[in-house]
Amino acid sequence: MPEKRSNFLLWIIVGGAAVLFFALSLTALALYLSDTGSASISFSSGQIAVLDLEGVILDSKDFIDQLKEYGNRPSVKIVLLHLNTPGGGVAASQEIYQAVKKFRAESHKKVVVSMSSVAASGGYYVACAADRIFANPGTITGSIGVIAEWLNYGDLLRWAKMESIVIKSGAFKDAGSPTRQLTDVEKAYFQSLIDNMYVQFVSAVAGARKMDEAAVRKLADGRVFTGQEAVKNGLVDEIGSFQDAVAAAAKMAGISGEPKLVSPPKKAFSLLETLLGESRSAALLRADQSESNIRFQYLWR
């Protein structure tokens, strides 16, 4: 009898230790998720990945990495893009647009867009890749078009009695030089580039919104629209807040009850980013000789 009692007590101790170990493991996991900014992650099988696209679009890599990491999680049933951006670089905007379309095709998950204060130009380009677009009544959107601009300090050089010396291999090699005025031929050359990028934008909108290109062109003169106007013009699907977009996304994904939202951890801003804004400071820090002084942008000015 003492031996049986001893074995029984041993099993109680072993079982209790196992339960304690499991509980401590869950606690450690919860603390880790909290420390990494992912405390919203749960063991629910009905999650919505919320990805923010804020500020001027300078680069696509971080956003596309987040789309892959969070959107492809088995527990995530749908992706919600929260946009608050005036647009940005042509290539960066197009890369995000293509990445969202590719994600939808490969994952078979839907993507919903919720526009915040601004989702214009390149921001609207990105929105067109989604299954459904929500905007607030006063959201600023549209601005379908292309812009290129740069500073010309030729007069300043001449005032300082300085001269820019250029040796080039072709007539257009220094087109857009900030030290001299554009020739008529160069103006036509840059206009042809702008026109080509404009056609790409219009074609993307027409295809995504199932509109005739001629109808899109009537709206694509660079002007912006409120969310209400955008709905009337067929550029946006529905007026609604972020919470409305969440509710619609949950319904589209077949999520019952309160959906669980998961998001990447927020980036910690430096003092410079706090004072100037993330996009502005990034632009200042990256503006070096490795970049051209001419930037073609889908950007609302």
Image (cartoon, grey):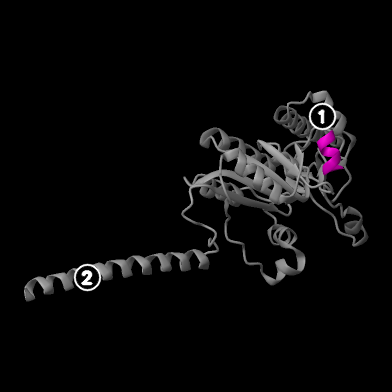
Q: Which residue is mark 2?
A: 12
Distance between the alpha carbons at the discs numbered 2 and 1: 73 Å
Viewer can see residue 57: no
- The amino acid pointed to by label 1 is Val
Question: Which image quadrant is residue 141 in?
Answer: top right
Q: Position of residue 259 (x, y in %)?
A: 58, 50
> Is 92 left or right of 25, judged from the image as shown?
right
Taking the magenta stretch, the answer to whether it contains residue 200 is no
Q: Secondary structure at mark 2?
A: helix
- Note whether residue 147 is visible: yes
At a point 88% along the width and 58% down the height, the residue shown is: 157
Which label belongs to residue 216?
Answer: 1
Residue at point 83%, 49% (across, down)? 150
How many marks are shown on the rendered structure? 2
**Residue 109: quarter of image:** top right
Q: Nearer the viewer, residue 82 or 101?
A: 82
Q: Secondary structure at mark 1?
A: helix
Which mark identifies residue 32? none
Q: Is residue 219 left or right of residue 207?
A: right
Of residues 179 and 129, the one nearer the viewer is 129
Amino acid under label 2? Answer: Ile
Nearer the observer, 68 or 191: 68
Residue 240: % across, % down? 75, 45
